[in-house]
Amino acid sequence: MEGINSSENMAGVFSYESSDIDWCEDNYKYSEHVVEYFNTMSSFMFFIISPIMLYLLHPYAKERSLAIHMVWVMMIFVGLFSAYFHMTLSFVGQMLDELSILWVLALGYAMWFPRKLFPSFIKNRTTFTRLVLVITAIASVSSFVKPTANAYALNCFGLHLLYTLALEMKCCNDQKVLQLAKMSVVLWVLAISCWISDRFGCSFWQKLDFCYLHGIWHILIVIAVAYGTTLIAYLDANSEIPYSLPALQYWPSEKWAVGFPHLVLKNTTKTKKQC
């Protein structure tokens, strides 16, 4: 009997609408197989933008560390698990969605957190990376204790990243870099505003028959991450591989009003000291 109950509980966490979270969008409005149709479809923006950013950041990753590609590879999984979650609103979908975001943040911290801001007891990035991975593993297990609080905790990490960027930007006077920083912050603020408004202002948006803000959050946040990671990569390149002479450019054209930022390395040969 206990075995049967255990199997039923296991099946239950995979079942439709087993999550405690239900976003503002009307359920099953466009398909009897997809709970939140627009939220599901908007998640596919991750599949479009992630490969573009993998391609654009490859010269920098090749010079710095190919492990940097793991951030945007994980972003593909964020899109996959987000689509699965919103299609089913299952508990498993929720946890996969949130844990994939947590690990993207962890990878970003491990590879890009400035050395000068390391705690005093940490001497190198290898030790820092191990510490981040241990903390992330503990946080992954802890996330099952109160799943409804996970999203708020993840957004707090976002605030800390903004604070860290603000510290790094104090010494920057390059107008192109400053403009990228402003755009990154604006996109993040717009994205988080959509998330909060959908979560806490649903009744208002239902009256207007516009319940798609969480889907818009998906689109804005993946663009914000594209801008933000390029900014972080630029600051990192200036610090860790300054000989590469990093510069910012936009794809597909510098002349376009909008585009995806990326790094161009003007020099990929380390300058050797002369005796």
Image (cartoon, rainbow, N blue to C red):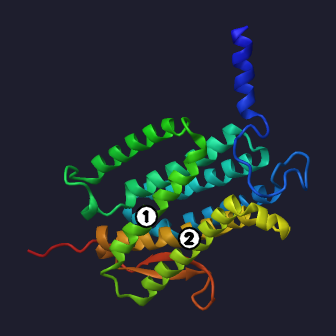
Residue, x 67% and y 37% (percent of image)? 92
Quarter of the image for residue 191 reads bottom right
**Mark 1 Cα shell of 10 Å, populated few (<14), some (14-19), many (≥20):** some
Q: Is residue 274 above or below residue 125?
A: below
User: Considering the image in quadrants, where does the C terminus appear?
Assistant: bottom left
Q: Residue furthest top?
A: 1
The percent coordinates of residue 183 (x first, y second) are 53, 80
The percent coordinates of residue 244 (x first, y second) are 34, 75
Instruction: Indicate left or right for 6 with 130 as reference.
Output: right
Camera sees residue 48: no
Residue, x 56% and y 46% (percent of image)? 149
Q: Residue furthest left?
A: 275
- The residue pinned by badge 2 equals 188
- The residue pinned by badge 1 equals 161
Which amino acid type is marked by label 2? Trp
Which amino acid type is marked by label 1? Leu
Residue in front for this viewpoint, 14 or 271: 14
**Mark 2 Cα shell of 10 Å, populated few (<14), some (14-19), many (≥20):** many
Circle 2 sits in a helix, a strand or a loop, which is it?
helix
State which tag comes first along the sequence, 1 or 2: 1
Residue, x 34% and y 44% (percent of image)? 130
Distance (Cα) linking label 1 and label 2: 11 Å
User: Considering the image in quadrants, where does the N terminus appear?
Assistant: top right
Instruction: Indicate left or right for 76 with 160 as reference.
Output: right
Quarter of the image for residue 222 reads bottom right
Residue, x 56% and y 54% (percent of image)? 73
Instruction: Indicate left or right for 145 with 39 as reference.
Output: left
Camera sees residue 127: yes
The percent coordinates of residue 176 (x first, y second) are 45, 87
Quarter of the image for residue 258 reads bottom right
